[in-house]
Image (tube, rainbow, N blue to C red):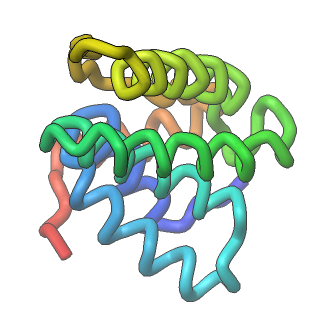
Amino acid sequence: MVYDPLYIEFIYYFNVKRDYFECHEVLEELWLREGRSLLYQGLLQVAVGLYHHRNDNLGGALKLFIGALEKLDLYPPDALGIDLDKLRQESLVYREGLTAAISAASPVSYPFHDLNIAVVDPLLAEAVGLLVVNPPHKH
């Protein structure tokens, strides 16, 4: 499969740089160009949910994880060269942690932690690896 350079950049910013704002920038461009795919939108929402949580906006993060899971559930477990099923499972755990933290009678901490998108297609892994050696310019 041939992957769009913007999608490859998204994986790079998500897994390598942990720059969830830049993830949003590159994938939104692809999402708009490709006709607003729900799969891209779900991936975007995971990244932006992490961005919000990192910035202590638990309510915004929870809202995005809820939306992301609704969209990602529509796709097979290995869509777009990634282990989408694993990302869904980890996002579900994240959503549950955020829900518990927000709904607790006394403040409960749900510490921020990065997620990783497991790449299952060797061609995609190679393309992301090339960006590690020669990083893209931010959008």
- Does residue 108 sit above or below 50 in this rendering? above
- Does residue 30 sit above or below 12 in this rendering? below
- Does residue 66 sit above or below 119 in this rendering? below
- Does residue 132 sit above or below 116 in this rendering? below
Is residue 27 toward the left or the right of residue 48 in the image? right
What residue sits 51% from the left and 27% below the top?
Answer: 95
The one of 100 and 22 positioned closer to us in this rendering: 100
What residue sits 44% from the left and 40% below the top?
Answer: 62
Is residue 107 toward the left or the right of residue 29 in the image? left
Percent position of residue 13, x then y: 27, 47
**Quick check: can you spot residue 59?**
yes
Q: Residue furthest front?
A: 105
Is residue 55 toward the left or the right of residue 25 in the image? left
Quadrant of the image containing the C terminus: bottom left
What residue sits 48% from the left and 34% below the top?
Answer: 125
Percent position of residue 129, x then y: 33, 36
Percent position of residue 77, x then y: 80, 30
The number of discs equals 0
**Quick check: can you spot residue 17?**
no
Percent position of residue 78, x then y: 76, 33
What residue sits 38% from the left and 16% below the top?
Answer: 104
